[in-house]
Image (cartoon, helix red, strand yellow):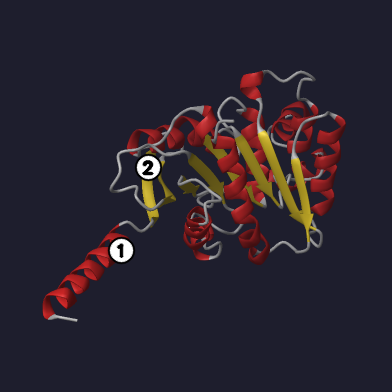
Amino acid sequence: MNYYLKLLLTLSLFTLSFTLFSQTSKVFETKTVKSEILGVEKKYSIYFPEGYEKSERSYPVLYLLHGYSDNHTGWIQFGEVQRIADLTIQEGKATPMIIVMPDADTDRIGYTNNIDGKWNYEDYFFEELIPHIEATYRTRNEKRYRAIAGLSMGGGGTFIYALHHPELFVAACPLSAWFGEADYEQRKKEMAPYYEGKSKKEIQAHYERNNPLVLMEQLPEKIEWNNRIRWYIDCGDDDHLSIDNSKMHILMTNKEIPHEFRMRDGGHNWSYWRSALPTVLEFVTKSFHQY
């Protein structure tokens, strides 16, 4: 091989390596948005697929919620979202998408509005976070390109958000979902500091608004086309939350609400949720596509 051919081959390999390196996916562990509703700077993590920085196209968005005791970095540190998303996209099973991971572990933990009105996280999510994401990044801002998923507490949040705002999400994927306290009396006991001075009627209403089983039961028999959601529900057979998730499956079946329900071998842990994420990405991709 002559000198010039070797030089050309070396330059070609360098160019290819540089191109591949420059087009890799990116994860930003901590971005912030100023929340007037909560009165704080709220953190979130975000995943950009390969090619985002070089292209001018807009991307569908998956909002991915963490569980209790984690924060916005949980899906990055323990869920390995970048590795799994990259691989699933490279295999052609998922479309390139932006993944937003909000923080629900500051001041008060959870995705709902508190009954005392002093920490309205759900209002922040819909009135500030989503508008911020759609104004800051190249996102497709219609319902058909927006999905939500989450684990445990975030699985419960996924149910609540999708049921409160079905006009905003094309797909919802709760994993090992926690539905909150089992009944009114337990909720009153658990949330006593925030319920001080509230009547039984107010507490009951707050419980019903934030319990996925109650919300699902209250769905009208006929769901309008623009409020339809594609559901994927997944919970391990050794998970202590499998009973409530099975109840949800039975309820949705009895109400003839189309959904995918999986109970696989596993428990309430990151090994299970990592194994679920590729299927979630594939499921929402099918929801984003047109048939």
Around disc 1, counting alpha carbons within 10 Å, would you say few (fewer than 14), some (14 to 19), or many (20 or more)?
Answer: few
Q: Which of pointers 1 and 2 lies earlier in the amino acid sequence?
A: 1
Closer to the camera, 160 or 84? Answer: 84
Q: Position of residue 261 (x, y in %)?
A: 77, 45
Q: Residue furthest left?
A: 4
Alpha carbon separation for disc pair 1 and 2: 29 Å
Return the x and y of residue 216 as percentages of the image width and height. Answer: 76, 31
> Is residue 111 at all visible to an observer of this figure?
no
For the C terminus, the image quarter is: top right
Q: Residue flagged by tag 2: what amino acid is it?
A: Val
What residue is rendered at 19% in x and 81% in y?
A: 1
Residue 246 visible in the snapshot = yes
Which residue is located at x 52 percent, y 43 percent? 63
Residue annotated with mark 2: 33
Point 47% across, 58% down: residue: 86
Q: Position of residue 3 (x, y in %)?
A: 12, 80
Q: Quadrant of residue 225?
A: top right
Name above or below for residue 227 compared with residue 24.
Answer: above
Give the vertical position of 28 relative to 120 (above or below). Answer: below
Query: Does dot 2 land on a helix, a strand or a loop?
Result: strand
Can you identify the residue that label 1 sits on?
21
The residue closer to the viewer here, 225 or 111, is 225
